[in-house]
Image: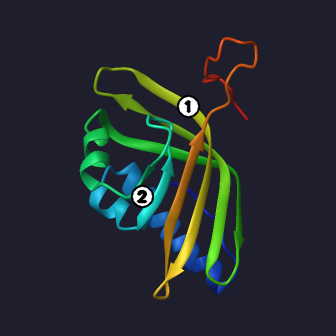
Amino acid sequence: MTQFIGKTRKEAAINATLQAWGRAMGEKRAVDAVAELTDDVIQFTLAAPLSFEGKSAEGLAAWFTTWEGPIAAEVRNGRLTAGEDVAFWNGLMHMTGTKTDGIKVDLWFRQTLGLVKIGGAWKIAHIHTSVPFAMDGSGLAELGLRP
């Protein structure tokens, strides 16, 4: 289970949003996952395109169909900074699972989440995931890095 630590009441509320989103992603429940996002969420994900705006339960559900069973996640070095109506969380994520073609996924990546408080509820308004790339001119993703 992914842990997003919070000590204050505000951090606990943010934590609840992040936990709900993380559980829904791991259990491949697309509608529940996008319910934690703003309608105009900006996403910079590992997959193309470079960015997109908005949420799509259908698109997420299609990606979920490429996985066998749940998608496991582990957090390292998670850090939450919260203001009155805006917060951000960043950390290292470890995603593991098996794709429908039998490929085992064991990937560490960086993640930053921006949240806003709307009508008293915290929602994810910005998602940025990335992996470093080799600076040797090859441009290859560094998929084997471990913290």
Q: Where is residue 141 in the image (x, y as percent from the top left)?
A: 61, 22
Q: Is mark 1 on a helix, strand or loop?
A: strand
Amino acid type at circle 1 is Leu
For label 2, the residue is 23
Q: Colour scheme in the image?
A: rainbow
Is residue 81 shown left or right of residue 9?
right
Q: Residue at x 63, y 85 (%)?
A: 9
Q: Is mark 2 on a helix, strand or loop?
A: helix
Quadrant assignment for the C terminus: top right
Q: Which residue is drawn at 60% across and 24% down?
A: 143
Q: Residue at x 67, y 24 (%)?
A: 133
Q: Position of residue 77 (x, y in %)?
A: 73, 51
Q: Quadrant of residue 134?
A: top right
The residue closer to the viewer here, 120 or 92, is 120
Q: Residue at x 50, y 66 (%)?
A: 124
Amino acid type at circle 2 is Arg
